[in-house]
Amino acid sequence: MKTKLYILLLSQLLSVIYINNSLAQDIHFSQFYSTPLQVNPAKTGFITGDYRLAGSYRNQWSSITIPYVTAAGSADLSFTAGKKKKDIFGTGIMIFNDKAGDSRFNTTYIGLTTAYHKTIDKYNNQFLSFGAMGAYCLSNINYEDLRWDEQYEGGILTENFPIGINDYYDLSAGLEYNNLIDKYTNFTAGAAVYHLFKPNQTFNDDGTSRVFRKLVVNVGANLGMGNKFSAYPKILFSKQGPFNEIVVGYLQRYSLNYNYLNDYGIYLGAFMRWNDAFIFVTKLDLNKFTMGISYDINFSRLALVSHARGGPEISVLYTGNIPGFHKKKIFCPRF
């Protein structure tokens, strides 16, 4: 009985915490490398093909309360640019929806992205990229399934709740450097700032609740290890107001064929979200299609009631070519 009561109280606490923190924190995915436009708008269009489609789905905390469910998708196009057609111009769209806990706190975010990738060496191997994203965000909350202390004391709720809908417009920007050393070895590093003008997000119709600016820094590499093996170390750091997140890890890829143009491979790897969870990942490349599956094993204080069960996550990526469209002169890496 005590365990059930504890879980019930924790469920309510998580909902309240999420409502408060969601005004300050953005969503996150464990497979951050599969949501490129959420990591940095400067990644828009930096692909080998003509277009890229990406999707991710995450289900978290189902062992404690009503799950926190997040789904995201993006599409971007790539064009050659510049006088010598050695640069790249990209444009795209990114959408995510997040629904959290007992309050059904729902956030829908739609962003339009654009980026320019300037080659900075004569061999067309190094690129400096700048990207920007303009977005619209709509949030709403359902108070009906929440319980408050007055209801336990007297059975009557006298709270006057504010309006349950809020929206705002947003602007973000980023820079990134890519060095394509060869088809098997490359390096990337970038930084982006989201919510540049700290838009107002409140259900009280006032200007006192601002979305914190968020800094995101990502570093990654593809280290070729012969015909069969490749190593993919990755680091993501983000800071939003008083909240920090560090994810560091490594994927090992085994190629299922020798012909790199027919790109089949399987990955195994592990990451750690600092002070929160271990993340175990497997991925599969089927030529232009990639699918990843990961699972978070929670080791924070919440593990007492979650029994270390964080949540599963699925990602898909597809990079394709448009018949009759231009051909790329560069080989962009998988990250």
Image (tube, helix red, strand yellow):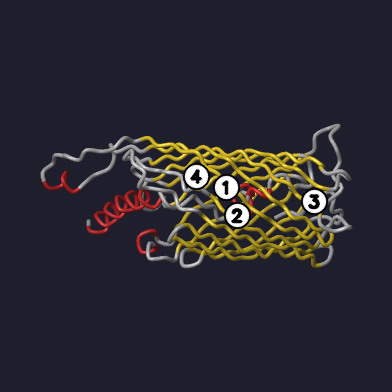
| Residue plotted at (54% across, 57% down) | 215
**Residue 91 vs residue 17, the one in the foreground:** 91
The Cα atoms of the two marked residues, 3 and 4, are separated by: 30 Å
Q: Where is residue 102 in the image (x, y as percent from the top left)?
A: 34, 43
The disc label shown at residue 192, or none: 2
Rendered location of residue 83, percent (x, y): 87, 43
SS class, disc 4: strand
Which of pointers 3 and 2 lies earlier in the amino acid sequence?
Answer: 2
C-alpha span from label 4 to label 2: 22 Å
The residues tagged by marks 1 and 4 sit, at their Cα atoms, a distance apart of 21 Å
- Residue 263: mark: 3
| Residue 70, label in figure | 4
Name, please, the residue furthest toward the left.
Answer: 154
Could you tell me if the residues under marks 1 and 4 are in contact, i.e. CB atoms within 8 Å? no
Residue at (61% x, 65% y) in the render: 249
Badges 2 and 1: C-beta atoms under 8 Å apart?
Answer: yes
Q: What's the CA distance linking mark 3 and mark 1?
A: 34 Å
Report the amino acid beneath label 4. Thr
Answer above or below: position of 210 versus 247: above
Q: Mark 1 points at which residue?
A: 172
Q: Is residue 218 above or below residue 132?
A: below
The dot on residue 110 is none
